[in-house]
């Protein structure tokens, strides 16, 4: 897949396969989450923070429950750490708000006690 191509949703990125596990309910409509996911991917957030903001060795966990928007915005715009600052010329206020909305829409992980396979 060319690097300029962006999948329109996580399931399309995964080859169109449906998730094998049941999806968790979310108070945010699925269309809203999907509509903002490409913005998160286009700006490369997934490269360090993972496709669902779960974090990795390169970037901290940012979802679910991101920082309050003001703190999130200040950090993204002026970070002094390994993450480069994203000024308005690179990441518009609208795109930043879309990314934040996507992170807010990521559902919390299920309690392991509710997963039958983990509790024989």
Image (cartoon, grey):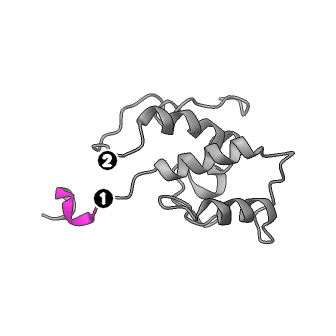
Above or below for 37 versus 17: below
Residue visible at 67% across and 62% down?
70
Residue visible at 55% across and 64% down?
61
Position of residue 85 measured from the top left corner of the image (x, y, whole percent): 81, 60
Callout 2 crowding tier (Cα within 10 Å): few <14, some 14–19, many ≥20: few
- SS at badge 2: loop
Find residue 19 and report its image quarter. top left
The reply to whether callout 1 and callout 2 are in contact (CB within 8 Å) is yes
Position of residue 7 measured from the top left corner of the image (x, y, whole percent): 58, 31
Position of residue 10 measured from the top left corner of the image (x, y, whole percent): 50, 37
Would you say residue 14 is visible in this rendering? no
115 relative position to 33: left or right:
left
Position of residue 3 measured from the top left corner of the image (x, y, whole percent): 72, 34
Above or below for 49 versus 10: below
27 relative position to 10: left or right:
left
Q: Which residues are magenta?
A: 110-116
Which quadrant is the N terminus positioned in? top right
Residue visible at 73% across and 60% down?
76
- Name the residue that disc number 1 marks: 110
Above or below for 20 versus 12: below
Q: Nearer the viewer, residue 43 or 87?
A: 87
- Name the residue that disc number 2 marks: 24
Q: Residue furthest left?
A: 120
Q: Residue furthest bottom?
A: 81
Would you say residue 73 is visible in this rendering? yes
**Cα separation between marks 1 and 2:** 8 Å
Residue visible at 66% across and 66% down?
71
Find residue 36 and report its image quarter. top right
């Amino acid at each position: 897949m060319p690097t300029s191509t962006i999948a329109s949703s996580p399931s399309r990125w995964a080859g169109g396969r449906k998730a094998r596990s049941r999806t968790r309910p979310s108070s945010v409509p699925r269309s809203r989450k999907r509509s903002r996911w490409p913005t998160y991917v286009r700006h490369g957030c997934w490269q360090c923070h993972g496709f669902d903001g779960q974090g990795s060795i390169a970037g901290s966990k940012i979802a679910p429950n991101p920082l309050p928007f003001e703190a999130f915005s200040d950090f993204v715009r002026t970070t002094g750490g390994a993450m480069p600052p994203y000024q308005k010329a690179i990441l518009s206020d609208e795109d930043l708000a879309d990314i934040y909305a996507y992170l807010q829409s990521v559902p919390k992980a299920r309690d392991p006690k509710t997963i039958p396979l983990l509790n024989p």
